Image (spheres, rainbow, N blue to C red):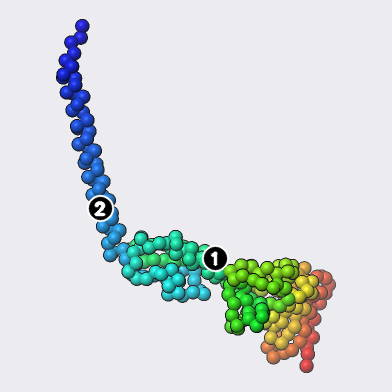
Amino acid sequence: MIDIDLMEELEYYQKAPVKKKGIDQKLVIGGVLLVVVIACLLFSPIFSVKEIKAEGASHFTTSELSEMIGLSAGDHLFLFGKSKAEKILEESPYIADAKLSAKLPDTMVISVQERKVRGYVPYMGSYLYIDEEGRVLEVQEAYQEALPLVKGLQFSSFTEGEVIPVDNSEALNVVLQISQMMEKYEVLDLVVEIDVSNPEDIYAYVNQVQIHLGNMENGDMKIKYMAEIMKTIPKEDRGILDLSALDDPKANVVFQYLM
């Protein structure tokens, strides 16, 4: 028969939890100290914003972007609400995407992807600034940059920040195609006006020259020819450049001077 001292066994098992409890207390104390140290570092003036940088911005200055989100020197690099600020920036029609990032020890970087104005659409005495998708970026009473004035789009209303809801969607598609091609051949700043009233019979105007494009078959080649030819025609010359027949491989480019 095995003789078991119940009192000794009871004392043995009662001591074990006491030892384990001592280890847990040390871990807790260590964890608390670690949290306190991290909190002190996070709230330290070392991580206050001293410099603000903007990347990818051309329409907005660094100061304008900072003002939009309420960011200023002295704000905490890690505690500033970056997600909320990004959403505020993306509310602007000009900003497609925004990202804020902390650069240690004291710099906040605002990175934005901006939409670019590609033309102007006349509307009730004002001008809609549109991007390459036909989105209205803003409305002004005048326009300044050398970009095409787009005529022939049919619509009765619009919402700033959204694509123009045109009745003649084919005409808008033609405008977007032409805009991309003109950007490709670097003639956006040359073209004064594009008339897409009839998407199958398009006209463009550069200086004092009327350019007949016809439809957009072989559109890339037509815009390329237009870019090359217009560089050779003096600004004071008046005339008609007919590129509509370029759909025919045997056709010749014709420029007719006007008095």
Residue 213 falls left or right of residue 158: right
Q: Residue at x 36, y 66 (%)?
A: 107
Query: Percent from the top left, x then y, of residue 211?
Result: 75, 80
Q: Quadrant of residue 118?
A: bottom right
Residue at image coords 18%, 23%: 12
Q: Is residue 2 above or below residue 70?
A: above
**Which quadrant of the figure has residue 230?**
bottom right
Upstream in the sequence, badge 2 or badge 1? Answer: 2
Question: How many badges with numbers are in the image?
Answer: 2
The quarter of the picture where the N terminus appears is top left
Q: In x, y percent, where is residue 202?
A: 76, 75
Work out how far the residue at label 2 is from the one at label 1, CA to CA, in angstroms. Answer: 40 Å
Tell me which amino acid carries mark 2: Val
For image coordinates 61% across by 75% down, the residue present is 129
Of residues 33 and 179, the one nearer the viewer is: 33
- In the picture of the structure, the residue carrying the numbered disc 2 is 36
The foreground one among 200 and 40 is: 40
Q: Position of residue 231 (x, y in %)?
A: 67, 82
Q: Nearer the viewer, mark 2 or mark 1?
A: 2
Does residue 230 show up?
A: no
Q: State the residue position of label 1.
A: 96
One can see residue 160 in this view: yes
Mark 1 element type: strand
